[in-house]
Amino acid sequence: EINLTNVSVGGLGLRGGQVIAHLEIRNPNSFDVETRSITYDLKVSDRDASGKETWVDFAKGTFDEKVQIDDGGRTRVEIPIDFTYSTIGGAIRSIMDRGTFNYRVEGTVALREPLRREIPYKHQGNVSLQGVR
Protein backbone atom coordinates (compact mmCIF):
# COMPACT_ATOMS: atom_id res chain seq x y z
CA GLU A 1 0.00 0.00 0.00
CA ILE A 2 1.49 3.32 -1.10
CA ASN A 3 0.48 6.73 0.22
CA LEU A 4 2.04 10.05 -0.74
CA THR A 5 2.01 11.85 2.60
CA ASN A 6 3.60 15.14 1.56
CA VAL A 7 5.53 17.07 -1.04
CA SER A 8 7.96 19.64 0.35
CA VAL A 9 10.43 22.07 -1.13
CA GLY A 10 14.02 20.87 -0.79
CA GLY A 11 15.59 24.04 -2.11
CA LEU A 12 15.44 26.76 -4.74
CA GLY A 13 18.25 28.22 -6.82
CA LEU A 14 18.73 30.58 -9.72
CA ARG A 15 18.04 27.95 -12.39
CA GLY A 16 15.77 25.51 -10.60
CA GLY A 17 15.26 23.61 -7.44
CA GLN A 18 14.25 20.40 -5.77
CA VAL A 19 11.06 19.09 -4.24
CA ILE A 20 10.93 16.05 -1.98
CA ALA A 21 8.09 13.54 -2.37
CA HIS A 22 7.41 11.76 0.93
CA LEU A 23 5.95 8.28 0.43
CA GLU A 24 4.78 5.87 3.07
CA ILE A 25 4.86 2.25 1.94
CA ARG A 26 3.01 -0.30 4.08
CA ASN A 27 3.42 -4.04 3.74
CA PRO A 28 0.29 -5.83 5.00
CA ASN A 29 1.75 -9.23 4.07
CA SER A 30 3.27 -11.85 6.35
CA PHE A 31 6.54 -11.72 4.37
CA ASP A 32 9.14 -9.04 3.59
CA VAL A 33 9.00 -7.15 0.30
CA GLU A 34 11.72 -5.23 -1.54
CA THR A 35 11.38 -2.60 -4.24
CA ARG A 36 13.49 -2.39 -7.38
CA SER A 37 12.29 1.11 -8.40
CA ILE A 38 9.73 3.85 -7.82
CA THR A 39 8.59 5.96 -10.78
CA TYR A 40 6.95 9.38 -10.64
CA ASP A 41 5.23 11.80 -13.01
CA LEU A 42 4.75 15.15 -11.26
CA LYS A 43 2.56 17.93 -12.71
CA VAL A 44 1.84 21.43 -11.35
CA SER A 45 -1.23 23.59 -11.81
CA ASP A 46 -1.17 26.81 -13.80
CA ARG A 47 -3.98 29.28 -14.54
CA ASP A 48 -4.27 31.26 -17.73
CA ALA A 49 -5.51 34.87 -17.96
CA SER A 50 -9.14 33.68 -17.92
CA GLY A 51 -8.56 31.65 -14.73
CA LYS A 52 -8.77 28.26 -16.44
CA GLU A 53 -6.61 25.65 -14.71
CA THR A 54 -4.18 23.56 -16.77
CA TRP A 55 -1.61 20.97 -15.69
CA VAL A 56 2.02 21.49 -16.68
CA ASP A 57 4.64 18.72 -16.74
CA PHE A 58 7.06 19.35 -13.88
CA ALA A 59 9.28 16.25 -13.65
CA LYS A 60 9.31 12.56 -14.53
CA GLY A 61 11.79 10.05 -13.29
CA THR A 62 12.74 6.87 -11.51
CA PHE A 63 14.08 6.37 -7.99
CA ASP A 64 16.27 3.25 -8.25
CA GLU A 65 17.33 2.77 -4.63
CA LYS A 66 16.33 -0.48 -2.97
CA VAL A 67 13.73 -0.18 -0.20
CA GLN A 68 12.90 -3.13 2.07
CA ILE A 69 9.66 -3.30 4.03
CA ASP A 70 9.39 -5.95 6.74
CA ASP A 71 6.33 -8.16 7.06
CA GLY A 72 3.50 -6.13 8.57
CA GLY A 73 5.72 -3.06 8.63
CA ARG A 74 5.84 0.34 7.03
CA THR A 75 8.60 2.64 5.89
CA ARG A 76 8.91 6.21 4.72
CA VAL A 77 10.81 7.05 1.56
CA GLU A 78 11.93 10.52 0.51
CA ILE A 79 12.31 10.91 -3.24
CA PRO A 80 14.27 13.98 -4.38
CA ILE A 81 12.90 15.50 -7.60
CA ASP A 82 15.09 18.07 -9.35
CA PHE A 83 13.60 20.59 -11.77
CA THR A 84 14.57 23.62 -13.83
CA TYR A 85 12.41 26.70 -14.18
CA SER A 86 12.48 26.39 -17.96
CA THR A 87 10.68 23.02 -17.78
CA ILE A 88 7.64 24.49 -16.04
CA GLY A 89 7.36 27.65 -18.14
CA GLY A 90 4.60 30.06 -17.13
CA ALA A 91 3.62 28.05 -14.05
CA ILE A 92 6.65 29.42 -12.20
CA ARG A 93 5.20 32.94 -12.30
CA SER A 94 2.02 31.89 -10.52
CA ILE A 95 3.99 29.73 -8.08
CA MET A 96 6.20 32.67 -7.09
CA ASP A 97 3.25 35.13 -6.98
CA ARG A 98 1.07 32.93 -4.72
CA GLY A 99 3.81 31.16 -2.79
CA THR A 100 1.94 27.87 -3.14
CA PHE A 101 1.20 25.43 -5.91
CA ASN A 102 -1.19 22.58 -6.57
CA TYR A 103 0.38 19.35 -7.75
CA ARG A 104 -0.57 15.87 -8.78
CA VAL A 105 1.75 12.92 -8.95
CA GLU A 106 1.35 9.35 -10.06
CA GLY A 107 3.66 6.45 -10.62
CA THR A 108 4.42 2.88 -9.70
CA VAL A 109 6.39 1.01 -7.08
CA ALA A 110 8.05 -2.00 -8.72
CA LEU A 111 8.59 -4.90 -6.32
CA ARG A 112 11.63 -7.15 -6.66
CA GLU A 113 10.96 -9.65 -3.89
CA PRO A 114 9.18 -11.96 -3.37
CA LEU A 115 6.94 -11.25 -6.40
CA ARG A 116 7.75 -9.09 -9.41
CA ARG A 117 4.79 -6.74 -9.49
CA GLU A 118 4.08 -3.04 -10.06
CA ILE A 119 1.81 -1.21 -7.63
CA PRO A 120 0.37 2.13 -8.82
CA TYR A 121 -0.08 5.23 -6.66
CA LYS A 122 -1.64 8.64 -7.26
CA HIS A 123 -2.03 11.78 -5.14
CA GLN A 124 -3.01 15.44 -5.46
CA GLY A 125 -2.32 18.30 -3.06
CA ASN A 126 -0.77 21.71 -2.40
CA VAL A 127 2.77 22.82 -1.44
CA SER A 128 3.66 26.11 0.29
CA LEU A 129 6.98 27.86 -0.30
CA GLN A 130 6.96 29.42 3.19
CA GLY A 131 10.09 28.78 5.13
CA VAL A 132 12.26 28.12 2.10
CA ARG A 133 15.65 29.75 2.37
Image (tube, helix red, strand yellow):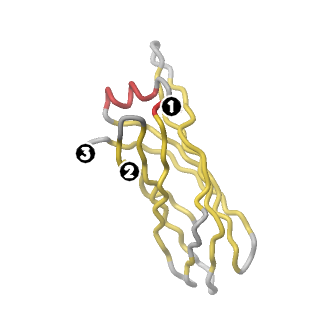
Q: Position of residue 23 (x, y in %)?
A: 49, 61
Task: Assess disc 1: are there few (<14), some (14-19) or many (≥20) residues with their C-alpha within 10 Å of its C-alpha.
Answer: many
Query: Which residue: 63% across, 71% down?
Result: 35
For residue 4, which numbered disc appears in the image? none
Q: Name the residue carrying label 2.
A: 8
Label 3: which secondary element: loop
Q: Do the numbered discs 2 and 3 sit on residues whose CB atoms are within 8 Å? A: no
Q: Position of residue 68 (x, y in %)?
A: 57, 78
**From the viewer's perspective, is residue 108 above or below residue 34?**
above
Q: Position of residue 32 (x, y in %)?
A: 61, 83
For residue 88, which numbered disc appears in the image? 1
Q: Nearer the viewer, residue 87 or 46?
A: 87
Q: Amino acid at mark 3?
A: Arg
Which quadrant is home to the N terminus? bottom right
Total marks drawn?
3
Q: Position of residue 33 (x, y in %)?
A: 63, 79
Which quadrant is home to the C terminus? top left
Task: Assess disc 3: are there few (<14), some (14-19) or many (≥20) residues with their C-alpha within 10 Å of its C-alpha.
Answer: few
When asked about the image quadrant of residue 100, the answer is top left
Of labels 3 and 1, earlier in sequence is 1
Q: Amino acid at mark 1?
A: Ile
Q: Amino acid at mark 2?
A: Ser
Q: Looking at this rendering, what residue extends furthest in the front direction?
A: 14
Of labels 2 and 3, earlier in sequence is 2
Residues under labels 2 and 3: Cα distance?
13 Å
**From the viewer's perspective, is residue 106 above or below residue 119?**
above
Of labels 2 and 1, earlier in sequence is 2
Q: Name the residue carrying label 3.
A: 133
Residues under labels 3 and 1: Cα distance?
21 Å
Label 1: which secondary element: helix
